[in-house]
Amino acid sequence: MMTKRYVVIATAWLLHATSWFLPAIKGFLGSSLDHSISGWEVFLSQTCSLRPCGAESADPWYGTVISVVGVVTTVLFVLASPWIVWRASRRLRRTAALVATAAFVVNCQWYVFYVPVRSDLGIGYFLWCASFGLLAIGLLLIAGSNNELE
């Protein structure tokens, strides 16, 4: 039987996966594009903060930091969270919950500081951000339970 804590984790994973295919933002930041960009396209564009993409970025320093953190936290979410849920110790789950909480707070900075027109953010961004918060809650619930996974 799937308990509430695993439903929370599964919902976080579902929201995260769904966010990759839904509109995350209208156009690219600083461009005049009028169409919506899906989550995976935004992710790929933000990796340019970590790798050469041919175009020089005009982002302020905090924009680069937000981009790098978003890329790193997304990779950790996708690659590390399943292992943490199914195999990690309670202590590591608590630590991962704190990391997921920090990721949620930092990734919310797109809305707070970086996107000039907040209405340009799409449902994909909000699902992506919420997935980190739900993951943190789920990991805290699992870490605090007396029942260990087999």
Image (spheres, grey):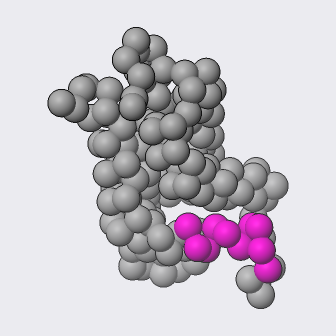
Residue reaching furthest to the front: 150
Residue 49, by quadrant, is bottom right
The N terminus sits in image quarter: top left
Using the image, determine if residue 36 lies above or below residue 91. below
Count of labels in the image: 0
**Magenta stretch: residue 49 in it?**
yes
Using the image, determine if residue 142 lies above or below residue 99. above
Q: Is residue 126 visible?
A: no
The C terminus sits in image quarter: top left
Side (left or right) of 5 relative to 53: left
Residue reaching furthest to the left: 1
x 41%, y 22%: residue: 148
Between 57 and 81, the one nearer to me in the picture: 81
Side (left or right) of 71 relative to 111: right
Between 99 and 2, the one nearer to me in the picture: 2
Using the image, determine if residue 97 lies above or below residue 56. above
Q: Which residues are magenta?
A: 43-52
x 45%, y 39%: residue: 86
Residue 9, by quadrant, is top left
**Which SS type dominates the magenta stretch?**
helix
x 77%, y 74%: residue: 51
Coordinates of residue 26 in the picture (x, y in percent) = 43, 70
Coordinates of residue 114 in the picture (x, y in percent) = 62, 52
